[in-house]
Amino acid sequence: MKIAIDAMGGDHAPKEIVLGAMDAVSRIDKLKITLIGDEKKIKEYLTDSKNIDVIHTDEVITSDDEPVRAVRRKKNSSLVLTAKEVKENRADACISAGNTGALMSAGLFVVGRITGVDRPALSPTLPTIDGKGFLLLDVGANVDAKAHNLVQYAVMGSIYTEKVRSVNNPTVGLLNVGTEDGKGNELTKKAFNQLQEAPINFIGNVEARDILSGAADVVVTDGFSGNIALKTIEGTAMTMFSMLKETFMSSFKTKIAAGMVKSDLKGLQSKLDYSEYGGAGLFGLAAPVIKAHGSSNSRAVFNAIKQAAHMVEFNVTDTIKSTMETIDLDKEENE
């Protein structure tokens, strides 16, 4: 299989992208990678080019660019050319740690959607106390959603969790303000009823306070609520470690204690880092598209590549497509 990667996307590009790519081809059988970006800068770090090709371009979409306009105007940018490799069947999947909005736009306009999926969902796997993790979707691909969109998210998330994360008959929960049936706003009430009829293991409503405890393997919500939940989790984790550091550095006694538990704290930090699970998948597109975290190091890039490779290997896109064809949603009636 071949995966195309935007070598210029992210805070630490191209160094960490190249290092992660070299690590991946050395550890994943029959994997080939195409790195797209400034060839001179890429080759500064490309010490082993076995199974790695480079496509040169000096055009880049930055974090400051307006996503849709950038994709349309910067057609030779590393991000757009990465998506084009998939569109023209020279790659099976693509990855970028760059501008999230631009990658979503390139996914829609270049790679294209699966027939039957109205809106793609941006879907990271987040940590849980037991270490298994859970999939949260959508976290911002679409801030507005209708009930049938949430059903599609649930089906796609369930398929991914079973095929890629090897969770048998994954549980699916609807993010809500209470666990009781009938809770929530008009959207969640309609979605609840439709999810009960979907071909998934729907367990009902789940509350935000329970999702890190493993309340469900897949948690479904609209992109507005999902993005808030994701950033609240990120912010809480960063604040907690900042407070711990401040406490441990407050006196000589606590500095000694810090030295004794340093390795344990690093393990805890790694456990809370969702880049350990790979990137956020853009589900609903005609091929696997992975958004790696903007601050990805080589390990996070490797995990995103492994994630994309698993999606290709287990035919996640084709399974989503065939499952969607079996779902009969009367959108007009149900919305």
Image (spheres, rainbow, N blue to C red):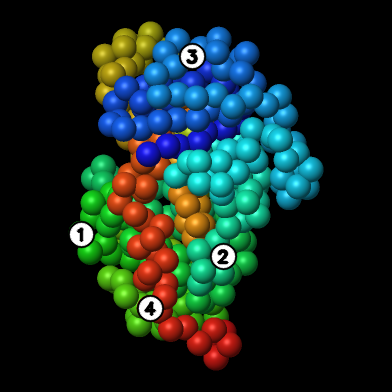
Q: Earlier in the sequence, mark 4 or mark 2?
A: 2
Q: Kindly report which numbered mark, 4 or 2, lies closer to the viewer in this rendering.
A: 4
Crowd rating for badge 4 (residues with CA inside 10 Å; few <14, some 14–19, many 20+): few
Q: Quadrant of residue 275?
A: top left
Closest to the observer, 126 or 112: 112
Q: Earlier in the sequence, mark 2 or mark 3?
A: 3
Tell me whether circle 1 and circle 3 mark residues in contact (CB < 8 Å). Answer: no
Residue 132 lies, in percent from the top left, at 26, 46
Q: Quadrant of residue 141?
A: bottom right
Give me the C-alpha separation between circle 4 and circle 3. 46 Å
Q: Secondary structure at mark 4?
A: loop
Tell me whether circle 2 and circle 3 mark residues in contact (CB < 8 Å). Answer: no
Q: Kindly report which numbered mark, 4 or 1, lies closer to the viewer in this rendering.
A: 4
**Up/down of 76 relative to 188, above or below:** above
Residue type, label 1: Asn
Give me the C-alpha separation between circle 4 and circle 2. 18 Å
Residue 119 lies, in percent from the top left, at 56, 65
Residue type, label 4: Thr
Q: Which residue is mark 1?
A: 168
Q: Earlier in the sequence, mark 4 or mark 1?
A: 1
Residue drawn at point x = 50 percent, y = 30 percent: 34
Q: Which residue is mark 3?
A: 46
Residue type, label 2: Arg
Residue type, label 3: Leu
Asked if residue 244 shows in the view, the reply is no
Q: Earlier in the sequence, mark 4 or mark 3?
A: 3
